[in-house]
Amino acid sequence: MQLIENLFGSKGRIKVLKKLSKHTGWQFNISELSKDMALNKGAVSRIVSRLEKENVVIVNKKGKIKLFQLNEENIFVKEAILPILKIEEELFKNIKKRIIHPFSEDIASSIILYGSYAKGSERLESDIDVMVIIKSKALEEKCRLISNKISQEFLENGTMLTIDVLDGKEFKKLYFNKEPSIVSIFGTGTVIKGKNLEELIK
């Protein structure tokens, strides 16, 4: 079906559709959407034009500014796009819950998702990368046992989950020593439980 290819044929289009689906009824202009999604204005403008041709977005003019929003009356939007993106969102929530639940607050200061899942560039075969910041070195063995159990459960369901464990002092030290893997987490990582990244390096 050519329509599916036209709508989901690029990461940029999917990114725009995800943004619009989370804010149904809202109107955006090219500049604010470009800034929110870290895409250049030209790319966003081309994507919106393509989606407008498919009647997936509605474009209105307010003076010289073009405002656009998801066309919620379009049958493909109602019956396909919104349900598909909702399923993906619920799946991701479930994944986070399964990772977070076993780590009590007295063990983990923070749980950070990084890699392709944090960047939003994951594929079906992508690994899930997580870093658990523990409250003290003494909890490391206990945390690793929990991590191994969760990773095994994910593996049995066909997904590779890698959990790195660091205590707070070590994480802070590696950050200030500009360890590349830790620095990159500050650029693309997402905290899914506990202290935010800035709090961890205070």
Image (cartoon, rainbow, N blue to C red):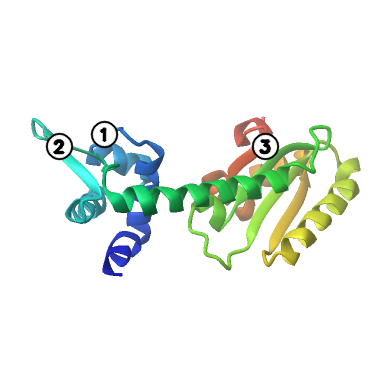
Q: CA distance from mark 3 to mark 2?
A: 40 Å
Q: Position of residue 17 (x, y in %)?
A: 35, 49
The label on residue 60 is 2
Q: Residue at x 71, y 48 (%)?
A: 98
CB under 8 Å between callouts 2 and 1? Answer: yes
Local crowd at mark 1 within 10 Å, few (<14), some, or many (≥20)?
Answer: some
Q: Tell which tag, 3 or 2, sits nearer the viewer.
A: 2
Residue at the disc numbered 3 = 193
The label on residue 105 is none
Local crowd at mark 3 within 10 Å, few (<14), some, or many (≥20)?
Answer: many
Taking the view exactly as shown, the residue that stands out farthest to the left is 63
Q: Residue at x 32, y 64 (%)?
A: 4
Q: Position of residue 7 (x, y in %)?
A: 30, 59
Quarter of the figure that contains the C terminus = top right
| Number of marks in the rendered image | 3
> Mark 3 or mark 2, which has the lower sequence index?
2
Looking at the picture, tell me which residue is in the foreground, 71 or 26.
Answer: 71
Q: Residue at x 32, y 49 (%)?
A: 77
Residue at the disc numbered 1 = 27
- Kind of residue at disc 2: Asn
Local crowd at mark 2 within 10 Å, few (<14), some, or many (≥20)?
Answer: few
Q: Is residue 186 left or right of residue 38?
A: right
Q: CA distance from mark 2 to mark 1?
A: 9 Å
* Mark 1 element type: loop
